[in-house]
Image (cartoon, rainbow, N blue to C red):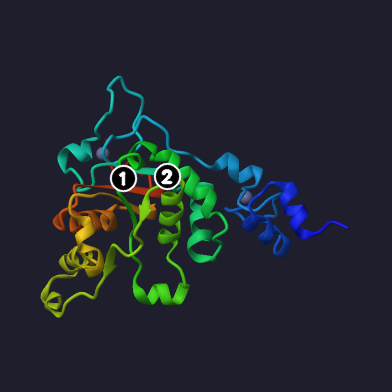
Amino acid sequence: MHGIAEEIAANGRSWGGRLLDLVLPPRCLACGVIVDRQGNLCGHCWQELQFITPPFCRQCGYPLPHSAVLDPLCAACVAEPPSFTRMRAALRYEAAGRRLILRFKHAERIEGVASFAGWMAEAAADILAETDIVTPVPLHRWRLVKRGYNQSALLARAVARLAGRSCVPDLLERHRATASQQRLSARARRENVTAAAFRPHRRHRDRIAGARILLIDDVFTTGATLEACARVLLRAGALGVDALTLARVVRDEAHPI
Ligand SMILES: [Zn+2]
Ligand SMILES: [Zn+2]
């Protein structure tokens, strides 16, 4: 008779993945159909997945048409440079990329973390080589309580482990907006809340000064959250802040080249 341990050893796959297979059938990370192994996509979704490859803006990572320029800079970054030095994303937030994020964020399907982290580490290999601390964008406490995990923290830990960097999951924390904001207009309040919503955790304040920090989030939409976090870290003395997400929205209307 074949014992579970022998089966796992013979198979050569990760313990975690194999044990999950024994309990639940492995499902496509993007659409949920049954696939051959945990952490995979079905053929259809795999084909739809769009990895972001060069050329892209050397600062914000926005994909650009082929050009003769080495390390191009997009018009948006020339007009208003973001606070982060470099931004990278593994996938476009479209089709299977979008479904995969939605399952990860809202359907509590976290078995893809190892695959996601692998794609992210590859997309930011040059940045990770210079990173001192990897940290996630913090989640609102009530959301953390409701969901039980911060998907960005899961990604940050896995990316840091792959690249041999240290991860500090609570380098930044969210805090409540102050009452003085009530007098501001809705728009000003929104902007103010974003900028004022983060602060360095008291316990880690000394680690930020002089460090190169890599911020991790699941998806880059407008970049406002990453921008707010980067500003806070730079104000606290970080030498530089980079950003890495699993996916990003690529929309030409919102981002003139
Ligand atoms: Zn699928
Ligand atoms: Zn740019």
Amino acid type indicated by mark 2? Ala
Left or right, 13 with respect to 215, comes to right
Q: Which mark is residue 49?
A: none
Camera-nearest residue between 257 and 45: 45
Write down the residue under mark 2. Answer: 163
Q: Camera-side residue: 208 or 187? A: 208
Q: Position of residue 211 (x, y in %)?
A: 23, 50
Q: Is residue 229 visible?
A: yes
Q: Are marks 2 and 1 in contact (CB under 8 Å)?
A: yes
Q: Secondary structure at mark 2?
A: helix
Relative to residue 164, is residue 201 depicted above or below? below
Spot the residue most to the top.
Answer: 68
Residue at (26% x, 56% y) in the render: 224
Q: Nearer the viewer, residue 111 or 186?
A: 111
Q: Residue 189: give x, y in percent of width and height.
A: 18, 69
Tally of numbered discs: 2
Above or below, 16 against 13 in this view is below
Q: For mark 1, what is the residue? A: 131
Q: Report which quarter residue 108 is drawn in.
A: bottom right
Is residue 252 left or right of 5 when viewed as pictured? left
For the residue carrying disc 1, how many other residues have a C-alpha within 10 Å: few (<14), some (14-19), or many (20+)? many
Is residue 228 visible in this depiction of the protein? no
Q: Amino acid at mark 1?
A: Thr
Please name the residue shown 36% across and 25% down the image: 66
Q: Which residue sits furthest bottom?
A: 179
